[in-house]
Image (spheres, rainbow, N blue to C red):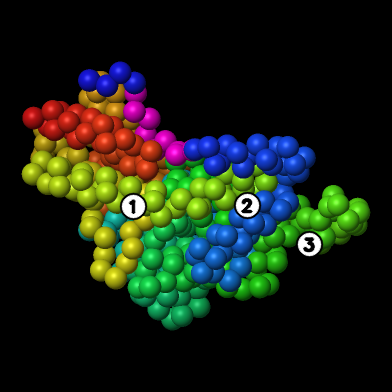
Amino acid sequence: MRNDFLIFAQPFIEEEEIDEVIKTLKSGWLGSGPKVAQFESDFKEYKNANYSIALSSCTAALHLSMLVSGIKPGDEVITTPLTFCATVNAIIHAGGTPILADIDIDTLNISTVEIRKKITSKTKAIIPVHFAGRPCDMDEIMKISSDFNLKIIEDCAHAIETVYHGQHVGTIGDFGCFSFYVTKNIVTGEGGMVLTKNNEFATRIKTLGLHGMNKDAWKRFGDDGYKHYQVVECGFKYNMMDLQASIGIQQLKKITPFWERRELIWKKYMIEFKDLPIILPPAPAQNTIHGYHLFTILIEKELCGISRDEFIDRLKDYKIGVGVHYLSIPEHPYYQDVLGWEPEMTPNAMKVGRSILSLPLSAKLTDNDVDDVIQAIKEILN
Ligand SMILES: Cc1ncc(COP(=O)(O)O)c(C=O)c1O
């Protein structure tokens, strides 16, 4: 039995990140400045994208992408029920109406067949979420987009490293929204990024992300003298700080070794669990690179004699922390009360959401940590 509790999804922070933050603290420039510009440029290069705008979160990135897409009250936006609430809330914040298309039970991603069923004359956009780091069927989603003239806002919170048919996710649709929250594949504490191909969209997101002030606002305290700025829209306070970007710059340099470590852990879990009465995550699809963000298993009482929540309690006894990604969106009272949703309306997501469990998959895990997880799971199921 372990001595310490194994925290689920711990960030992997080393001396390089600490040194970069200290340098920034000593520079006197903590807010949005040269480090944010460098992180944007490094991330854009890594993703082979045209424009990148660093923001305070992926939620902010989704919200601004929605506004810049022109989503207005009455417009419908289709997304998946197996996601974090931020995806759906961003649609509501923009004034749109969220519409859920159920997941494909095999891939756990939004079903393109269900998307087509949900399209009406009011549909304006789709938010595919690359769940757990496995890319959605972007060929079909882009076909739907061109058939019905819909904007595509990719929620890439799980999918920083994900590649689909040779193209980085987040550069396929009109916008790609990324998260660097503490549990993500690379972190800045809180933080997000939008990628887009469109110069006008990029400029408007930059403006909306800082109170609606024109671009000179970013330079107003620079060392070449004070610059006047003008407020051209009613924007938001969504900018990233240099303090956050300092962590991101160093994390991005290690993105490949982090990914390789998670891939190794993933493969070990797949081998060790292959004969257990649990359902393992869908394998990476052909001609794609999986982001390996979450290792999800399904715990079905009929198969293994124990419910998902009992299983979580047992893992706690073994001092193993886990996550649930996610209870389906219609399980939450807000959406039931305000939108009249019920879990049964998206039955696949309901079923998965009631049995899914995410195991530790951080690059920070030691071999002993991984062995502890494997041993605990085997003992509980025996
Ligand atoms: C699928 C998904 N979308 C959006 C978000 C929101 O990201 P952030 O916390 O950076 O706002 C998350 C964060 O957990 C997420 O998992």
Report the quarter where the C terminus lies.
Answer: top left
**Which residue is found at the position 43% from the left and 43% from the top?**
336
- Magenta region: 5-13
User: Which disc number belongs to residue 55?
Assistant: 2
* Residue toward you, 111 or 167: 167
Badge 3 is on which residue?
A: 215
Q: Quadrant of residue 167?
A: bottom left
Count neighbours of disc 3 (C-alpha within 10 A) and say few if under 14, some if 14 to 19, many if 20 or more: some
Q: At 33% across and 47% down in the image, what residue appears?
A: 261
Quadrant of residue 5 within the rendered picture: top left
The secondary element bearing badge 3 is classed as helix
Total of numbered circles in the picture?
A: 3
Rounded to the nearest angstrom, the CA distance separating label 2 from label 1 is: 27 Å
Q: Kindly check if marks 2 and 1 are in contact, taking CB atoms under 8 A apart as contact.
A: no
Counting from the top left corner in percent of width and height, residue 116 is at 36, 71
Q: Is mark 1 within 8 Å of ligand 1?
A: no
| Relative depth, front residue between 244 and 77 | 244
Q: Specify the principal SS of the magenta part.
A: loop
Between 113 and 203, the one lying in front of the other is: 203
Q: Is residue 265 left or right of residue 208?
A: left
Q: Position of residue 348 (x, y in %)?
A: 26, 53
Disc nearer the start of the sequence (2/3)? 2
Q: Point out residue 48 in the picture as x, y percentages from the top left corner.
A: 51, 69
> Cβ–Cβ below 8 Å for labels 2 and 3?
no
Question: Which amino acid type corresponds to the residue marked 2 in the rendered image?
Answer: Leu
Secondary structure, mark 2, is: strand
Residue 9 in view of the camera? yes
> In this picture, is 41 found above or below 308?
below
Q: Which mark is residue 260?
A: 1
